[in-house]
Image (spheres, coloured by chain):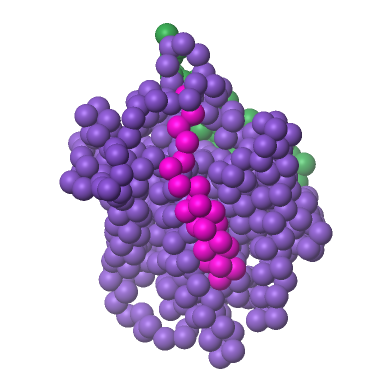
């Protein structure tokens, strides 16, 4: 095991400032999820955002960091074929023995406390309007306490995925500085699991034909959320690059440029595609496009040239529009917030874009293979694990609210008060496609 | 069908991980990793199909 990496004082100070921007990404996600839901559940989605963030932070500090650890810290290894597979950290629970200062481990803890909150908030977009508050918190306990730290250890704390290069000569090993795999794809796959368990919203799919359109109740909120998310992502990508890729502070400039360009290209492409398809640009799909560009930048911002960031973002913009369409129309997956398309599919594209466009691993075929192994782990292990845990929760404490609650709206049913009490409560008319 | 799909997902991952200690040449590893991924995608397809909302 290598010694813990040391950070210069400049890097550490800059890292703290960048990490303190990350909660803005949570603000953005919360606004987006709330705005894309109907008004009858707006307060519930926002409260759920706060609550799952709170649960994630506490559980991660109590248990999660013990499994994830930080580079250079104690860990358990399995010897397989003569090679040491670092598979889980060996930190004490409740941060015992960890001094909270400007050390690398402390900064990793701080960043991860915010990051796991982002991963936990992502499924709220898919479960909006029918996912019980208590069930979302229980699901978050398992995500923050086990699934997230386990995978994040493999990627960020010298775990076997990140060591594929040194162990088996596969480029630099699996590369992901900003959390495209650990935060975005994991959050997106959790969203997929929740969408499957909950089923679609009442009235979404009828026997007559295609799905009913259930519009966002506040697109302005969604678009403002995109701007907040942008600020948070600048911090997330930059801090991740300094801590996990040992980038110099000067690299922050390239990362910020690439993050912005990726989101910019993605939103414009999404707007153009929707204009071509529907004769007008669609605001909520364009917002999802912006977010997909940010998600792609999480994997690739530290490694791409700016032109490549534009291209990667543009592809994300196209992908997310068609993915939302396919998920909703063909696969009958009701995802009000577009969480699966933006975070899972966007994140997977970002991981591939690293191998396709960057010099990471010298652009080698080994790097391609390392990225594919990471993707295979997400789909082949993390998705079944996440879904299995959510399914077990559902046996004991059902995730879905009952039909009355869904009709009334989660605000009145679970919270006893609507988000907009001065306005007339909803009607049940939906626009048929 | 859903359970079969998840078992295929896990099996595909098992194949991917097994290639690392068992095979040494890059083309062989790549071939088996892609095979494992293909198995995972089949499994994902089964799970998706089992979750489709029935029409009518």
- Majority secondary structure in the magenta region: helix
Question: In this rendering, is residue A212 above or below A207?
Answer: below
The boundaries of the magenta stretch are: A212-235
Q: Is residue A398 visible?
A: yes
Question: In this rendering, is residue A326 above or below A76?
Answer: above
The furthest residue to the top: B56
Question: In this rendering, is residue A382 above or below A234?
Answer: above
The furthest residue to the left: A416
Asked if the magenta segment contains residue A69, the reply would be no
Which colour is chain B painted?
green
Q: Residue at the location (48% across, 25% down)? A: A431
Which of A361/A74 is in front? A361
Q: Is residue A139 visible?
A: no
Name the spot of residue A263 as percent of width and height, x first: 66, 56
Which of A367/A289 is in front? A289
What is the tally of numbered marks visible in this picture?
A: 0
Name the spot of residue B25 as percent of width and height, x first: 75, 46
Name the spot of residue A362 as percent of width and height, x first: 80, 61
Q: Residue at the location (73% across, 42% down)? A: A272
Q: Quadrant of residue A5?
A: bottom right
Which colour is chain A painted?
purple
Asked if the magenta segment contains residue A216, the reply would be yes
Q: Residue at the location (42% across, 16% down)? A: A206
Name the spot of residue A160 as percent of width and height, x first: 55, 57
Which of A406/A282 is in front? A282
Quarter of the image with the C terminus of chain A in it: top right
């Amino acid at each position: 095991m290598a010694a813990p990496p040391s950070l210069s004082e400049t890097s550490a100070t800059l890292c703290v400032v960048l990490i303190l921007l990350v909660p803005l990404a949570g603000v953005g996600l919360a606004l987006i999820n709330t705005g894309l839901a109907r008004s009858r559940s707006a307060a519930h989605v926002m409260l759920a955002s706060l609550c799952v963030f709170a649960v994630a932070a506490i559980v991660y500090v109590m248990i999660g960091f013990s499994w994830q650890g930080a580079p250079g810290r104690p860990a358990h290894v399995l010897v397989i074929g003569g090679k040491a597979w670092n598979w889980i950290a060996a930190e004490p629970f409740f941060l015992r023995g960890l001094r909270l200062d400007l050390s690398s481990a402390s900064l990793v803890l701080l960043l991860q406390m915010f990051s796991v909150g982002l991963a936990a908030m992502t499924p709220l977009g898919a479960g909006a309007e029918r996912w019980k508050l208590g069930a979302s918190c229980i699901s978050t306990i398992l995500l923050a306490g086990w699934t997230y730290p386990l995978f994040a250890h493999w990627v960020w704390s010298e775990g076997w995925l990140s060591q594929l290069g040194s162990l088996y000569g596969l480029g630099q090993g699996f590369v992901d500085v900003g959390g495209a795999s650990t935060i975005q794809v994991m959050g997106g796959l959790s969203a997929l699991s929740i969408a499957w368990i909950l089923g679609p919203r009442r009235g979404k799919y009828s026997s007559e034909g295609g799905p009913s359109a259930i519009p966002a109740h506040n697109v302005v909120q969604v678009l403002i959320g995109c701007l907040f998310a942008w600020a948070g992502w600048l911090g997330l990508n930059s801090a991740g690059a300094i801590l996990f890729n040992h980038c110099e502070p000067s690299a922050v400039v390239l990362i910020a440029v690439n993050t912005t360009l990726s989101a910019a290209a993605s939103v414009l492409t999404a707007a153009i595609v929707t204009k071509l398809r529907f004769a007008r640009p669609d605001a909520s799909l364009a917002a999802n496009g912006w977010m997909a560009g940010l998600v792609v930048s999480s994997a690739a911002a530290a490694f791409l040239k700016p032109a490549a960031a534009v291209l990667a973002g543009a592809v994300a913009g196209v992908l997310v529009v068609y993915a939302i369409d396919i998920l909703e129309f063909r696969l009958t997956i009701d995802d009000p917030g577009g969480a699966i398309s933006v975070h899972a599919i966007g994140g997977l594209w970002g991981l591939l874009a690293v191998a396709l466009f960057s010099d990471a691993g010298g652009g080698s075929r080994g790097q391609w293979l390392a990225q594919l192994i990471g993707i295979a782990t997400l789909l082949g292990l993390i998705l079944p694990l996440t879904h299995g845990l959510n399914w077990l929760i559902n046996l004991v404490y059902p995730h879905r609210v009952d039909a009355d609650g869904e009709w009334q709206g989660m605000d009145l049913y679970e919270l006893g008060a609507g988000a907009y009490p001065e306005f007339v409560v909803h009607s049940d008319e939906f626009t048929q496609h | 069908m859903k359970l079969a799909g998840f078992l295929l997902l896990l099996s595909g991952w098992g194949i991917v991980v097994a290639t690392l200690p068992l095979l040494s040449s890059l083309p062989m590893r790549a071939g088996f990793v892609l095979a494992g991924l293909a198995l995972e995608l089949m499994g994902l397809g089964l799970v998706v199909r089992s979750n489709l909302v029935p029409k009518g």
